[in-house]
Amino acid sequence: MQTANSFPDVQTELVRRHKSTATTMLSLLVGAVLLCVLAFVSQKSLTQRSNPSLHMGVLIAILILGFCAVAFRRTKFAAMRLQDIAGLQGPSGLLISLQKTTLRVALIGVAVALIGFGATLYLGDPAYTYRAAVVAAGVFLYGYPVRVSWEQAVRRYASENGTNDAE
C-alpha cells in the first residue's frame, strides 16, 4: 500500500518516465522526417521499377499498421485494464504500463516508416517514404504521451484502489 509520504516518489517517477517516453517519441518522429530527406536526396540515384502487386501490398500494409496502432493503443488504455493494473501493481506498475504501451505504439510507427523507406529503395519511388512518413507521424502524434493524461490516470486508478492516499 502506498502512503501519502510516497506520493512524491510516484510523481518523480511519472515525470521521469514521461520525459524519457516523450523524448523517444519525438526522436522517432525526427527519424521519420530524416528518412524522407534521405529519400529525397537519393532520388536521382534510385532506379524506378514497376511492380503493381508490391505497390498495393506496401500501401495496404502501411494503412493496416496505422489502424492497428490506433486499435492497440485504445485496447491497452481501456479503463478497466488500467484499473486492474493499478489494483494489482500500484501506481508504479500503472506508469510502467503506460510507458510500455506508448513505446510499442511508437514501434508500430517505426515499422511503417521503415516499410515505406524499404519500398522506396526497392521500387525507386520516394513517394512511398513520404506516404509512410505521414502515417508514421500520425501514429507518433496519436500515441504521444500527454503528461496531464498520465497524471489523471495515476490519480484516478490508483486512488480508486486505495493505493494512493495523497489526495
Image: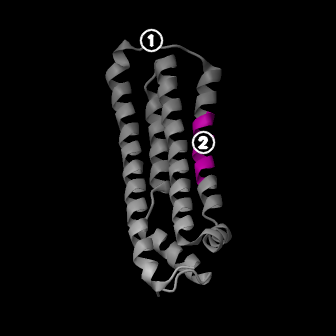
Pinpoint residue 99: horizontal percent, then vertical percent. 50, 57
Pinpoint residue 110: horizontal percent, then vertical percent. 49, 39
Q: Identify which residue, 12 or 29, lies in the foreground.
A: 12
Q: Estimate the spatial distance between the alpha carbons at disc 1 and disc 2, rounded to whole Å.
A: 27 Å
For image coordinates 59% across by 29% down, the residue present is 58
Please tell me which of labels 1 and 2 falls first in the chain.
1
Q: Residues within 10 Å of mark 2 (few under 14, many from 20)?
A: some
Secondary structure beneath label 1: loop
Question: Where is the N terminus found, in terms of image quarters?
Answer: bottom right
Which residue has dot 2 on it? 65
Q: Nearer the viewer, mark 1 or mark 2?
A: 2
Three-letter code, disc 2:
Leu
Three-letter code, disc 1:
Thr
For image coordinates 52% across by 24% down, the residue present is 119
Does the stretch in magenta take in 67? yes
Q: Which mark is residue 47?
A: 1
- Compared across the picture, whether 56 is left or right of 103 comes to right
Pinpoint residue 36: horizontal percent, then vertical percent. 38, 32
Q: Is residue 14 above or below residue 120?
A: below
Color theme of the render: one colour
Q: Residues within 10 Å of mark 1 (few under 14, many from 20)?
A: few
Q: Which mark is residue 161?
A: none
Give the overall secondary structure of the magenta segment.
helix
Q: Identify which residue, 120 or 82, lies in the foreground.
A: 82
For image coordinates 35% across by 34% down, the residue present is 34
Residue segment shown in magenta: 60-70
- Quadrant of the image occupied by residue 82: bottom right
Q: Is residue 37 above or below residue 105?
A: above
